[in-house]
Image: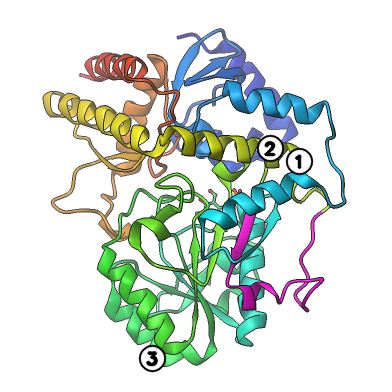
Amino acid sequence: MQTLESKNMFERALKVAPGGVHSPVRSFKSLDHHPIFFSKAEGPYLYSVDGNRYIDYCQSFGPLILGHLDPDVKTEVHKMIDTAWSFGACEKYSLALGEWIQSRIPWAEKLRFVSSGTEATMSALRVARAFTKRQKVLKFEGCYHGHVDSLLVKAGSGLAGESASDSAGISAAVAADTLVCPLDDIVAFKTIMEREAKNIAVVVIEPLPANFGLLIQRKEFLQEIAAICKQYDVLLLFDEVISGFRVALGGMAEVLGIRPDLVCYGKILGGGFPVGCYGGRQDAMNMVAPLGPVYQAGTLSANPVGMVAGLTTLQKMERLNGWKTLQERTQLLTQGMLELFKTSKTPYTVTSFASLFWIHLPTPSAIRRIQDIPTSQGPEFRGFYLACLDQGLYLSPHAYEVGFTSLAHTPEVIEQTLQIMKGALGKME
Ligand SMILES: Cc1ncc(COP(=O)(O)O)c(C=O)c1O
């Protein structure tokens, strides 16, 4: 496929934005290739400025569970745009979405809409600190919770639980208030909690870690974490920005049967528009202004276009029982991929959960921690990715990012995908 116009645009974009992009993972940096520039999207497809069509399994990194430009969402969004763009005042659209969530997700006793997943996690931590009157938070290595200072930390090299900042510009003092624990290691978790629980406001986890590979956790591990949090009176925050409304209506909390104290949503909740949400126990959420002393606000919070896009998306998913269909379609896709990988010389496999999948190098046992990921995953991925791209398949452009299916990925589109992948694998040999 020729991609000259994209290449030219990227050269221009490099003069506009750092690295030519407005979010790092869009840059194709690890692929040593210019990114593709798109001008249109519909259903499962992205259309590039070069005139090429790609089947899209990135789907804006997860929000578009119905695919691009879903006709029902489009109708409601057009209606809203003809009615109002922003109120900065009380309105009926966020009430409708808020009540819809509350009536289906019992642990969202009270909630607040914001404009991104990052804002949601940042605000939830503030609530937790105010509610418990403790300073520290505990996160897990390999989980991403947005670019909140106190959550952009990684494991330190010393004592279990110690941390270091994972980005320049974060003060050592902020990083020191975050403790980092390995995933799938209940002994390490207990050790940190025994030592530090009295200082820990909240334990935050992606119950389905899907930002650094797809690190499916054992149910018992997550259950033990929940039990230990309860034992020490430490709040448990499920970051369901990816998994919420994707793995099931009630996200991983529903799948696992675990009731978190606090929960964060984003992505699907806005149906492709910038919406995030944090919520949970009423006694904790009542700490938020104007009711309580925790300040949190937003000029465009609960933007009506995002509210109707989100509600229409969720209502459609519920009406169609979209989660079951998505699971079946994803299995069709991943089974097909496994067959292809088996007969090709490219050493790949795929792990999936509900409508998320991750293509990776095979390992003897399930990958549950970042240390289990083969070190050559990054370099090996490049050839495979670019061969697929050249055949019209747009996967998430990073070896550690997951793929997403949507209801627009019909069995016919999945068959097309497998044919494209077969061609790409053939070209690599
Ligand atoms: C689990 C999780 N939490 C939080 C975030 C941050 O959300 P946003 O990018 O909307 O700020 C992300 C984004 O990928 C995420 O995957």
**Residue lying at 74% horizontally and 24% vertically, measured from the top left:** 78
* Between 381 and 188, the one nearer to me in the picture: 188
Q: In the figure, is residue 31 to the left or right of 19? A: left
Q: Which residue is mark 1?
A: 304
User: Magenta span covers which residues?
Assistant: 277-298
Q: 147 above or below 149?
A: above
Q: Which residue is mark 3?
A: 194
* Between 45 and 283, the one nearer to me in the picture: 283
Kindly check if marks 2 and 1 are in contact, taking CB atoms under 8 A apart as contact.
yes
Image x and y of residue 54, in percent: 46, 17
Q: 314 above or below 157?
A: above
Task: Give the quadrant of residue 310.
Answer: top right
Please rate how many residues cluster around mark 1, counting C-alpha atoms within 10 Å: few if below 14, some from 14 to 19, many from 20.
Answer: many
Q: Which residue is mark 2?
A: 308
In the picture, the quarter occupied by the N terminus is top left
The amino acid sitting under disc 2 is: Val
**Residue lying at 12% horizontally and 24% vertically, measured from the top left:** 343
In the picture, the quarter occupied by the C terminus is top left
Q: Secondary structure at mark 1?
A: helix
Q: Which of label 3 and label 2 is nearer to you? A: 2
Looking at the image, is mark 3 or mark 2 earlier in the sequence? Answer: 3
Q: Is mark 2 within 8 Å of ligand 1?
A: no
Kindly check if marks 1 and 3 are in contact, taking CB atoms under 8 A apart as contact.
no
